[in-house]
Amino acid sequence: MRYVYGLLCILGTVLPYGALLPWLVENGPDIQLFLADAIRTGIGTFAWLDVMVSALVLLVFIWTEGLAKGMKHLWLPTLGTFTVGVSLGLPLFLLMRTVHLEKVPSP
Protein backbone atom coordinates (compact mmCIF):
# COMPACT_ATOMS: atom_id res chain seq x y z
CA MET A 1 0.00 0.00 0.00
CA ARG A 2 2.90 2.35 0.51
CA TYR A 3 3.32 2.63 -3.28
CA VAL A 4 -0.40 3.27 -3.76
CA TYR A 5 -0.34 6.00 -1.11
CA GLY A 6 2.84 7.44 -2.61
CA LEU A 7 1.22 7.61 -6.05
CA LEU A 8 -1.89 9.19 -4.51
CA CYS A 9 0.32 11.82 -2.85
CA ILE A 10 1.73 12.71 -6.26
CA LEU A 11 -1.70 12.79 -7.93
CA GLY A 12 -3.13 14.69 -4.96
CA THR A 13 -0.55 17.41 -5.51
CA VAL A 14 -0.24 17.53 -9.30
CA LEU A 15 -3.95 17.53 -10.15
CA PRO A 16 -5.07 20.38 -7.85
CA TYR A 17 -2.02 22.50 -8.68
CA GLY A 18 -2.53 21.73 -12.37
CA ALA A 19 -5.83 23.58 -12.04
CA LEU A 20 -4.52 26.33 -9.75
CA LEU A 21 -1.34 27.33 -11.59
CA PRO A 22 -3.04 28.50 -14.82
CA TRP A 23 -5.39 30.62 -12.70
CA LEU A 24 -2.40 32.12 -10.85
CA VAL A 25 -0.59 32.86 -14.11
CA GLU A 26 -3.67 34.64 -15.43
CA ASN A 27 -4.71 36.48 -12.24
CA GLY A 28 -1.69 36.59 -9.98
CA PRO A 29 -1.87 36.02 -6.24
CA ASP A 30 -5.13 37.95 -5.81
CA ILE A 31 -6.70 36.37 -2.71
CA GLN A 32 -9.92 38.39 -2.93
CA LEU A 33 -10.48 37.36 -6.56
CA PHE A 34 -9.57 33.77 -5.71
CA LEU A 35 -12.19 33.60 -2.96
CA ALA A 36 -14.77 35.39 -5.10
CA ASP A 37 -14.19 32.94 -7.96
CA ALA A 38 -14.28 29.97 -5.60
CA ILE A 39 -17.72 30.81 -4.20
CA ARG A 40 -19.23 32.51 -7.25
CA THR A 41 -21.80 29.75 -7.71
CA GLY A 42 -23.78 27.57 -5.33
CA ILE A 43 -21.89 24.49 -6.46
CA GLY A 44 -18.59 26.27 -5.86
CA THR A 45 -19.69 27.19 -2.34
CA PHE A 46 -20.83 23.61 -1.77
CA ALA A 47 -17.45 22.26 -2.90
CA TRP A 48 -15.47 24.66 -0.74
CA LEU A 49 -17.55 23.96 2.36
CA ASP A 50 -17.17 20.23 1.74
CA VAL A 51 -13.40 20.60 1.43
CA MET A 52 -13.16 22.78 4.54
CA VAL A 53 -15.12 20.31 6.69
CA SER A 54 -13.14 17.38 5.23
CA ALA A 55 -9.87 19.16 6.02
CA LEU A 56 -10.97 19.79 9.60
CA VAL A 57 -11.96 16.13 10.03
CA LEU A 58 -8.65 15.05 8.51
CA LEU A 59 -6.62 17.28 10.86
CA VAL A 60 -8.44 15.82 13.88
CA PHE A 61 -7.81 12.30 12.51
CA ILE A 62 -4.12 12.99 11.83
CA TRP A 63 -3.48 14.20 15.35
CA THR A 64 -5.66 11.77 17.31
CA GLU A 65 -4.64 8.67 15.35
CA GLY A 66 -1.03 9.78 14.98
CA LEU A 67 -0.55 10.50 18.65
CA ALA A 68 -2.35 7.29 19.65
CA LYS A 69 -0.01 5.29 17.41
CA GLY A 70 3.08 7.15 18.62
CA MET A 71 3.83 8.59 15.18
CA LYS A 72 6.33 11.39 14.63
CA HIS A 73 6.37 14.24 12.11
CA LEU A 74 2.60 14.75 12.13
CA TRP A 75 3.29 18.29 10.98
CA LEU A 76 4.04 16.94 7.47
CA PRO A 77 0.50 15.81 6.56
CA THR A 78 -0.83 18.84 8.44
CA LEU A 79 1.28 21.12 6.25
CA GLY A 80 0.25 19.14 3.17
CA THR A 81 -3.40 19.66 4.07
CA PHE A 82 -2.92 23.41 4.48
CA THR A 83 -0.75 23.94 1.38
CA VAL A 84 -2.39 21.54 -1.08
CA GLY A 85 -5.46 20.08 0.55
CA VAL A 86 -7.04 16.85 1.68
CA SER A 87 -5.87 15.30 -1.60
CA LEU A 88 -2.29 15.39 -0.29
CA GLY A 89 -2.80 15.39 3.49
CA LEU A 90 -4.79 12.14 3.64
CA PRO A 91 -2.62 9.91 1.45
CA LEU A 92 0.52 11.35 3.05
CA PHE A 93 -0.77 10.53 6.52
CA LEU A 94 -1.84 7.05 5.41
CA LEU A 95 1.59 6.48 3.88
CA MET A 96 3.30 7.62 7.07
CA ARG A 97 0.94 5.48 9.16
CA THR A 98 1.61 2.41 7.01
CA VAL A 99 5.38 2.86 7.27
CA HIS A 100 5.12 3.44 11.02
CA LEU A 101 2.96 0.35 11.60
CA GLU A 102 5.35 -1.79 9.55
CA LYS A 103 8.16 -0.78 11.93
CA VAL A 104 6.17 -1.38 15.14
CA PRO A 105 6.03 -5.03 16.26
CA SER A 106 2.49 -6.48 16.47
CA PRO A 107 1.34 -7.48 19.98
Image (cartoon, rainbow, N blue to C red):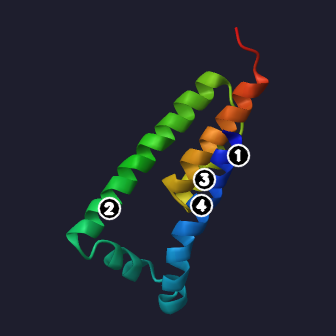
Q: CA distance from mark 4 to mark 1?
A: 12 Å
Residue 12: quadrant of the picture: bottom right
Which element is circle 2 on? helix
Quarter of the rendering containing residue 97: top right
Q: Are marks 4 and 1 in contact (CB under 8 Å)?
A: no
Disc number placed over residue 19 in the picture, else none: none
Q: Nearer the viewer, mark 4 or mark 2?
A: 4
Q: Residue at x 51, y 76 (%)?
A: 20
Asked if marks 4 and 2 touch (Cβ < 8 Å), the reply is no
Residue 72 location (% of width, % of height): 71, 34
The kind of residue on which mark 4 rests is Leu
Q: Which residue is mark 2?
A: 47
Q: In terms of secondary structure, where does tag 3 sit?
A: helix
Q: In the image, what residue occupies the spot 68% across and 50% down?
A: 6
Dot 4: element: helix
**Local crowd at mark 4 within 10 Å, few (<14), some, or many (≥20)?**
some
Q: Nearer the viewer, residue 46 or 11?
A: 11
Rounded to the nearest angstrom, the CA distance separating label 2 from label 3 is: 20 Å
Residue 24, horizontal then vertical, whole percent: 52, 84
Q: Can residue 65 be seen? A: yes
Left or right: where 78 falls relative to 104: left
**Mark whose residue sits in front, 2 or 3:** 3
Instruction: Identify residue type, mark 1.
Output: Tyr
Which residue position is annotated with label 4? Answer: 11
Q: Which residue is mark 1?
A: 3
